[in-house]
Every structure is written in structure tokens, then in C-alpha cells.
Image (spheres, helix red, strand yellow):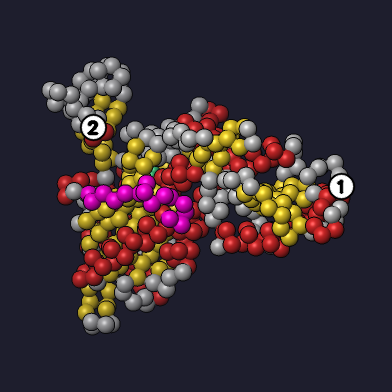
Amino acid sequence: MEQKPVSLEDIVSLSKRRGFIYPGSEIYGGLAGTFDYGPLGVALKKNIENLWWRRFVEERDDMYGVDAAILMNPKAWEASGHVAGFSDPLVECPKCNSRYRADHLQEDSNGLLRCPKDNEILSAPRQFNMMFATKIGATQDDSATVYLRPETAGGMFVNFKNVVDSFHPKLPFGLAQIGKAFRNEIAPRDFIFRVRELEQMEIEYFVRPSEWEAAFEAWRVSMHEYAKEIGLPTENVHELEVADGDRAHYSKRTIDFEFDYPFGRKELWGLAYRTDFDLSAHQEASSQSLAYMDEESKEKLVPHVIEPSFGVGRTMLAVLASAYREDELGGETRSYLALSPKVAPIKAMVSPLLKNKPELVEKAKIVRQELQKVHPAIAWDDNGNIGKRYRRQDEIGTPFCITVDFDTLGETPELKDTVTLRHRDSGEQERLSIAEAAERIRQAIA
Ligand code: GAP
């Protein structure tokens, strides 16, 4: 059966139906730009994050993890330029009051921006700051204004000195953080692609100024390796060199990693050379020295920064879009997720052939416990017929289904303590010992 192109609706519908992602505050009609992760979504998200953390923090000697506060002293966001400049051009329709980002619309033949709903000429663009402001403490005047961080990066720059003082790392080294960020997007859209409450996995990698190009190149390569590990097809990940006028205010070079989403080629991740912009700005605004004593050159310097930045939601959407398939198996059409076993929320499902045979159920429970020594995410399903159980697991991307039958119990003596292991993508089954089935799972997630 020929693969039909994946639509965003396919992914939204499967995500809701099977408990990956729900609209935020749904019983109250939702809240635009927010989404809630259900049991399978949170498992997939954590797997994506854990692989990132393992690869970029735990497996390296030059990386330091932090988890900084979301609320920061507002002076940090003044110094970083976000209070003055973290804005998008907002245009409004005088008739229906709809609001749009001017840079997301096409001018008409007269150079005018028109409302996509009623064709009215839109207002002139005005800069709209995307930071969410709130008040801290009991005071309600302007002095109590704080911001929900618009990027996790800020929490790393303000902890640069702490980490240097505690760990005395040698250049180059980096800080890494996974956490929430908030942006009051004018037009959230495309499911979890553009949201107002997002999660980022970011690295601030500090280098000697003369070494930035080599570090930039090394991170560019590492980002592609991570994309491969989580199952993004190489041919769907592209690089875009961001032009001079289009880069963020702090960046001297940016590559956008783009992905072929069902709604077009769009930004997945970013890689930026932030120079010493942030450390110098924080040094000046805080009157704290953020200079680093380079023991090698006996020189004091403010390090420069390479920043690989990954949106968790966009990564997850790319993973889901890459994995979604429809085919025909055993005369029935099915939809399934061909997830890499490394990110799959459930690694295998164990099932007794018949749920009303206590000896099968008991043995299947023992098999499950054995497999859980390899990984705890081994599901149990004894509902409905075996075909239906397989379909349910296929749809959520479980790579293996393991069935315990009478041969497992020794009905055919030479098959005692063997199980059937079914492969999600091909539907093929093989007969294996319990130990071999465990080994299959171990190898798939290694
Ligand atoms: N610290 C650099 C920074 O935040 P960015 O390009 O604004 O740079 C980095 O954001 C990444 O965060 C993006 O490449 C994307 O993956 C994700 N991201 C940004 N805005 C987002 C939004 N509104 N919704 C979902 N993800 C977003």
C-alpha cells in the first residue's frame, strides 16, 4: 500500500485519541497556545529529553547541567536586550480585530497587508513584546514586575560565574538546561509547533574567541547526530544560513535547522554564535566580573558563546510526523508509529494468549517481570483478541509484542519457555527463548 502524505490532522487525532497530547484546559474550551501531555506524551517527551541529556551532558566531561529559576531578576532581561527588543511586528484588522504577525503575511500587489479573513487593509505594524509579565510579592506597582523567561538561556548566563567558581572548568566548556520558557506569541499555530508555553533544551558553550568557528562546526555535526538518534530521517532535516538582517539581536551567525513538517519546511532548532554579547552585557549591568582567567594563555577574557537550542515540542512533532504510517496488514488497514525503540514510550507489550487461562496469565506475568529487568516500560494487555492488542500497540509505537501461549508452558516440549515476538513494522513473528526476547529489547534500545 502506497504511503499517503502525513497530515497534521492525522497526528493531532492520534495524539488525542491515544493519550499523547491534549489541548490545554480542554474542558473549559482550551487556552490558545497551550497543550497538556498525557501519559504516553510525557513518556515520549522524557525519552527525547533523556537522550539529549545523556548525549550532551552525561557522556561529556566538558558539560555542566543546571536547572535555573523561571522567574529571574528583571534586570537580567533588560541586560540581555529582551525588554527592549524581544518583539514581533503586530498588525490588526480594524473590522474583525484579528491580530497577525506582519512577517507571516504576504503583501498584495499594492504592497498592502490585508486581513486573511475579510480582506480589510491591516493597521501599520507595531512592535509587540512577547515576554509574559507578572507581579512578584504583595506590591502591585511597576517595581514588582517580573517576567516568565522567554528562553532558558538567561538562567545559564547568570550562573556562569557560579559554575566557574564551583568547578573551575577549562575552556571550552558548556552549561546545559532543559526547562520551560514562555512567549506571548501573536499567532500560536500548527498544534505544538508554535505555542505560548514551550520547553527548550539549550546549551551555552563557552569558547575562546579565536575558537568559535571550530566549536560552531562541531555542534552543527552533533545536532545532526542527535537528530538521527531520535529517528528523524536525514533527508527531512535541512540547514538554513540565516541572513544578516534576520538574525536575533545577539547573534553574529545562526543556522536554523529546518524540518519537513506536514505543513511545510519550518524551523526545528537553532544554532547561534552569540559572541560575548550576553556575558559582557550581564557583567556591565550587574557590576560583577564575568571574566574568565584562562590558565593556558594566562589571559583574562570574557568567553564567547556557541548556542545549540532545541525546542522540545517541535522535536516531538518532528518525531511523530516521521513515525506516522498507514498500511495494510492481514487484510486490514492500520495506522502505526514507526518510532525508534529508544524514544518509544513503551518498549514491549506482554500478553497471555487467553486471559481466562490462569496458567497462561501467571506465566505471562513472570515473563513480563523478566523483561522489566531490561526496561521498566513493558506493558501488559490481555483485553480483546490478540490482533486487537497488536493494533493498539502499533498505534502507540510499541516496537515488540510478546505472547505467552501453551507452548511456553511446555505443550510442545521443545518449545517450553519460548515466546512469540512480533515486530511492529513488518508484523512478522519469531519464536524465541525468554532470554533471547529480553536481549532483542536490550539491543533495540541500546
Ligand atoms: N536561546 C535561543 C532561542 O531561544 P529561538 O530561535 O527563539 O532561540 C529556540 O528558539 C528554539 O525554541 C526554536 O528553534 C524552536 O525549536 C523553539 N521555539 C521557539 N519558539 C517557540 C514556540 N513559540 N513554540 C514552540 N517552540 C518554540
x, y percentage for residue 341? Answer: 56, 53
x, y percentage for residue 362? Answer: 83, 52
> What number of labels is visible?
2
370 drawn magenta: no
Q: Quadrant of residue 189?
A: top left
Residue appearing at x 71%, y 54% in the figure: 431
Residue appearing at x 24%, y 30% in the figure: 105
| Residue type highlighted by circle 2 | Ala
In the image, 221: left or right of 40? left
| Secondary structure type for disc 1 | helix
Residue 303 visible in the current orientation: no
Task: State which mark lies toward you, 2 or 1.
Answer: 1
x, y percentage for residue 123? Answer: 20, 25
230 drawn magenta: yes
Residue 382 visible in the current orientation: yes
Of residues 316 and 309, the one nearer the viewer is 316
Task: Give the extent of the magenta segment.
Answer: 228-242
Q: Which residue is mark 1?
A: 358
Q: Which residue is mark 2?
A: 102
Q: Is residue 301 above or below residue 135?
A: below
Residue appearing at x 26%, y 49% in the figure: 240
x, y percentage for residue 370? Answer: 73, 60
Between disc 2 and disc 1, whose residue precedes? 2
